[in-house]
Image (spheres, rainbow, N blue to C red):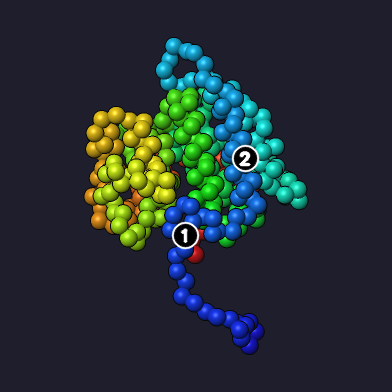
């Protein structure tokens, strides 16, 4: 037979979950690319500290953001080159575009799910050129994307960025969407945390450091005032769904409808050789 037989000494086991909380990530073998991406995001974070908000009459959209963004615009290719090995250097200018697109708009000083999608595209490009591997997938979300979220929250708070294309109380969240999808999948089969618990302040305060979904909820409650049911009606409704798997499935459908299929979001998305726009061939 041309098929390779498994080694005679192979001991097979039933696979089981090992990564239950973010601190469990220590068990996960971190590739160099993961560490380099976290270092890149740490640089963006440091630049925020070096670019304090300026005094201006308008409360929102602090113009110091443009100074911060100009630095990224200038340095993006150098930053990406620290992650991409030299034999793939030709990919750097294309990949760097997605990094620049992922941090908000410097004209409007706003941020939304289209910018978040650009960061997902940035990570996707790094997977396509082989810098990130399938083995890295948990660390991509819970190390890299989580660090990206922290930096974006700091940008939003420091420069009082406007939500891009926000649907107000009818949207899921002013700024993010993907961490609700990944965060709900992290909670599937949790022994005691159910969807109803994320509107419970005590449950959120005790568990937010370990769960991406609850960290998102905490940030909303820090940024908004008034009853949760009023300022985040969609999430309030979702808290009544009986299981995390149903929440997860519903959010994936919602992301497709509210983000990927909405012209105001996708009109800004850029396509290149790594993420081309080709019609689906009917097969």
- Which percent across, then down, holds residue 111? 46, 32
87 left or right of 18?
A: right
Q: Which residue is label 1 attached to?
A: 19
Secondary structure state at the residue bearing disc 1: loop
How crowded is the residue under tag 1: few (<14 C-alpha within 10 Å), some, or many (20+)?
some
Kindly tell me whether residue 269 is visible in this rendering.
no
Residue at 25% from the left image edge and 53% from the top image edge: 241
Image position of 130 with respect to 228: above or below: below
For marks 1 and 2, the one nearer the N-term is 1
Using the image as rendered, state which of residue 180 and residue 199 is in the foreground.
Answer: 199
Kindly tell me whether residue 187 is visible in this rendering.
yes
Q: On residue 57, which mark appears?
A: none
- Which percent across, then down, holds residue 48? 56, 28
Residue at 72% from the left image edge and 49% from the top image edge: 85
- Which percent across, then down, holds residue 136? 57, 57
Quadrant in which the N terminus appears: bottom right
Q: Which residue is label 2 attached to?
A: 40
Which mark is in front, 1 or 2? 1
């Amino acid at each position: 037979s041309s098929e390779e037989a498994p080694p005679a000494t192979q001991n097979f086991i039933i696979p089981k979950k090992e990564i239950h909380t973010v601190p469990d990530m220590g068990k996960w073998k971190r590739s160099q690319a993961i560490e380099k991406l976290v270092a890149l995001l740490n640089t963006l974070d440091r630049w925020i500290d070096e670019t304090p908000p300026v005094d201006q009459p308008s409360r929102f959209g602090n113009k110091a953001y443009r100074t911060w963004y100009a630095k990224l615009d200038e340095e993006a290719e150098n930053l990406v080159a620290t992650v991409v090995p030299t034999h793939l250097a030709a990919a750097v200018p294309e990949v760097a575009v997605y990094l620049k697109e992922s941090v908000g708009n410097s004209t409007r000083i706003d941020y939304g799910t289209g910018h978040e999608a650009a960061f997902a595209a940035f990570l996707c490009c790094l997977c396509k050129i082989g810098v990130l591997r399938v083995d890295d997938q948990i660390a991509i979300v819970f190390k890299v994307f989580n660090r990206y979220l922290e930096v974006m929250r700091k940008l939003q708070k420091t420069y009082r960025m406007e939500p891009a294309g926000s649907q107000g109380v009818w949207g899921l969240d002013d700024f993010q969407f993907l961490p609700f999808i990944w965060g709900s999948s992290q909670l599937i089969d949790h022994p005691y945390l159910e969807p109803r618990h994320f509107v419970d302040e005590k449950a959120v305060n005790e568990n937010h450091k370990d769960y991406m979904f609850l960290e998102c909820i905490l940030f909303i409650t820090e940024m908004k005032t008034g009853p949760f049911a009023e300022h985040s009606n969609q999430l309030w409704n979702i808290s009544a769904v009986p299981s995390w798997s149903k929440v997860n499935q519903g959010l994936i459908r919602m992301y497709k409808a509210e983000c990927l299929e909405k012209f105001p979001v996708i009109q800004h998305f850029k396509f290149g050789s790594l993420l081309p726009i080709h019609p689906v061939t009917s097969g």
